[in-house]
Image (spheres, rainbow, N blue to C red):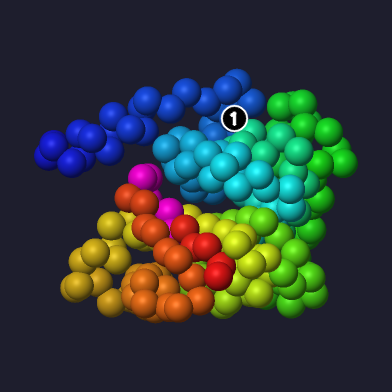
Amino acid sequence: MSQIESSWKFAEELVTESGPLAEARQHSLEVGVEPVSPAVGAQLAVVAAASGAKNIIEVGTGVGVSGLWLLRGAPRATLTSIDREVDHQQAARDAYLGAGVPVNRFRLITGRASDVLPRMNENSYDIVFVDADPGSVIEYVEHGLRLARPGGLVLVAHALWHGSVANPARRDATTTQFRTLLTEVSTSPAVISSLSTAGDGLLQLVKL
C-alpha cells in the first residue's frame, strides 16, 4: 500500500459513525446501494455546519446515510430528498426517525430526479447534494446550480468514479461525464470549485 493510500485509509478509519448511521450504512450495503464513505459523510456534515444550512435538497436518498450526515451538521435544516425507489425511501425514513430526527425536518419525494427537479424553486436551497444516476450527473448539477441560492453549495458524490476519472484510458460514458463536469467547473466563472479526494471523491461548488 502506497503512502497516499495509507493516508486515505487512515482518514476513513478516523471517522466514528453513530449507531443509527452505522446501521444505515450496513443496510445500504446489504441492499446493494453504495453509500458515501465515512470521510465523505464527515465532510458533508462539516460543510452543512459551516454554511449554517437551513434548506437542503438531496438527489438520491439511498437508505439515508448521506441524509443523516447532512442533518447531523445542520440540526435546524429541512431536508428534501428525491429517489425513485420507494423501498429505499422507507428505509431512509426509518433511519431518520431512529436517529431522533423529527418528521417535520425531512420530506421524501418519490420519482425520477429529471422529472422532479424542474418543478423545484430556484435560488431556494443552501445545499444541493447529488448522488444519483451518474450518467445524468451533468444534468443534475445544472439543476443544482439553478436551485442553489447565491452563495449556496452544490456537492457531488463519487466525483472520481472509482478511480476511473484520473485514468485517461477510461473513456466509458459515466467516466467521461464526470471528467467533463470537473473540467468545465474548474474554469467556470459562475462557481468556486474544489475536488476532495476523500472516499470516491466529493466535488464542492459554491454558486457565485
Q: Is residue 100 left or right of residue 188?
A: right
- From the viewer's perspective, is residue 144 above or below residue 51? below
Q: Main secondary structure of the magenta part?
A: loop
In the picture, the quarter occupied by the C terminus is bottom right
Query: Residue 68: in sight, yes or no?
Result: no
In which quarter of the view is residue 142 placed?
bottom right
Q: Residue at x 64, y 26 (%)?
A: 20
Residue at mark 1: 21
Taking depth in this image into account, of 15 and 133 the one nearest to the observer is 15
Extent of the magenta region: 198-203
Query: Residue 5: in sight, yes or no?
Result: yes
Q: How many marks?
A: 1
Taking depth in this image into account, of 178 and 205 the one nearest to the observer is 205
Residue 14 forms part of the magenta stretch: no
Residue 2 screen position, x and y as percent: 12, 39
What amino acid is found at the position of numbered circle 1 in the picture?
A: Leu
Taking depth in this image into account, of 10 and 168 the one nearest to the observer is 10
Q: Residue at x 59, y 30 (%)?
A: 21
Q: Residue at x 71, y 27 (%)?
A: 99
In the picture, the quarter occupied by the N terminus is top left
Residue 172 screen position, x and y as percent: 33, 75
| Mark 1: secondary structure | helix
Residue 44 screen position, x and y as percent: 53, 44
Q: Residue at x 28, y 63 (%)?
A: 164
Q: Residues within 10 Å of mark 1 (few under 14, many from 20)?
A: many
- From the viewer's perspective, is residue 171 above or below residue 19? below
Q: As drawn, which residue projects farthest toward the left?
A: 2
Q: Is residue 16 left or right of residue 62?
A: left
Residue 130 screen position, x and y as percent: 57, 60
